[in-house]
């Protein structure tokens, strides 16, 4: 990760130090994706072991770089890592009286066409249409997560995404509308790296929901307390 700037140097040491200092054994740590550069599970064992050794109960969400994690094989991962790591996809996990729901998500990232002042004046509409198909797929997966929790009687939700809930040209999206439909109290996401990207989507309270950007470099690798 060093190629992405000085903030990433020894980032794994920062993660380990901050988690050890801030997280208690009874706490729940949700990591919102990009757990390993490995393309196959065998190439990711060391990274997953690092996460497993962190304090607390660990719940993992798929990121766009998690090539080892086929959404259709989530149950297999949960069986293999039972009692050590929990994989959030097409399911949910309980935290007190909250259901933790989530999916990788997706958002249209361009290309955008800018004028001389750097304002967006257009975009690639063909790629936007392709992004819409991926968003529809992720919304269906997120709906499955909400449905499973609601069927078990949960009425309080925290929603996790890897991608931000909106693109730079959106004020709302299918993801924000679903969060509002179920009255989620928090929406937690990552993916936006570097200072120029930190404000690509919603941060803070919007329509009564608290939106949290938790990218590692944004938080300086300190876990953010949601509840």
Image (tube, rainbow, N blue to C red):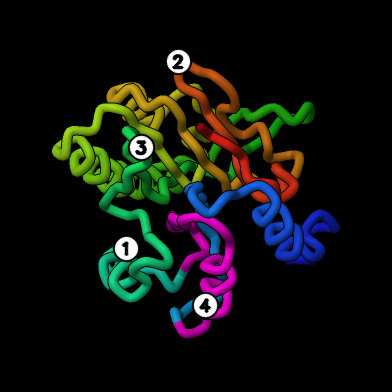
Label 3 residue SS: loop
Q: Callout 4: helix, strand or loop?
A: helix
Name above or below for residue 147 compared with residue 176.
below
Give me the C-alpha separation between circle 3 and circle 1: 26 Å
Q: Is residue 59 magenta?
A: yes
The mark total stands at 4
119 falls in the magenta region: no
Task: Give the CA distance from mark 2 to mark 3.
Answer: 21 Å
Residue 67 appears at what percent x and percent y? 46, 70
Q: Residues within 10 Å of mark 4 (few under 14, many from 20)?
A: some
Q: Is 125 or 166 nearer to us in this picture? A: 166
Residue located beneath label 1 in the image = 71
Residue in the picture at 50% in, 38% down:
188
Tell me which label, 4 or 1, sits earlier in the chain: 4
* Segment colored magenta: 42-66
Q: Which one is closest to the eye, mark 4 or mark 3?
A: 3
The image position of residue 95, as x and y in percent, is 37, 41
The mark found on residue 44 in the picture is 4
Q: Residue at x 19, y 35 (%)?
A: 150
Say what secondary structure mark 1 lies in: helix
Asked if residue 7 lies left or right of residue 224, the reply is: right
**As displayed, is residue 80 above or below residue 181?**
below
Q: Is residue 149 left or right of residue 107?
A: left
Q: Are marks 4 and 2 in contact (CB under 8 Å)?
A: no
Q: Residue beneath label 2, please?
A: 208
Q: Residue at x 66, y 32 (%)?
A: 199
Which mark lies nearer to you, 4 or 1?
4
Sequence-earlier tag: 4 or 3 = 4
Q: Quadrant of residue 205?
A: top right
Residue 176 location, quadrant? top left
Q: Is residue 78 left or right of residue 42?
A: left
């Amino acid at each position: 990760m060093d190629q992405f700037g000085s903030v990433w140097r020894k980032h794994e040491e920062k993660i380990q130090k901050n988690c050890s200092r801030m997280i208690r054994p009874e706490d729940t740590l949700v990591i919102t994706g990009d757990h390993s550069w490995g393309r196959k599970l065998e190439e990711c064992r060391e990274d997953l072991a690092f996460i497993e050794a962190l304090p607390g109960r660990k719940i993992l969400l798929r990121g766009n770089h998690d090539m080892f994690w086929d959404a259709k094989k989530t149950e297999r991962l949960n069986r293999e890592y039972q009692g050590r790591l929990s994989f959030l996809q097409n399911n949910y996990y309980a935290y007190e009286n909250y259901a933790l729901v989530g999916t990788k998500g997706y958002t249209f990232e361009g290309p955008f066409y800018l004028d001389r002042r750097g304002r967006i004046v257009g975009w690639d509409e063909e790629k936007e249409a392709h992004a819409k198909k991926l968003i529809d797929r992720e919304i269906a997966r997120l709906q499955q997560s909400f449905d499973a929790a609601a069927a078990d009687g949960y009425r309080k939700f925290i929603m996790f995404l890897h991608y931000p809930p909106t693109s730079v040209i959106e004020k709302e999206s299918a993801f924000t509308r679903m969060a509002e439909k179920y009255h989620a109290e928090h929406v937690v996401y990552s993916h936006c790296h570097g200072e120029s990207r930190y404000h690509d989507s919603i941060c803070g309270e919007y329509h009564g929901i608290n939106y949290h950007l938790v990218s590692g470099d944004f938080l300086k690798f300190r876990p953010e307390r949601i509840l």
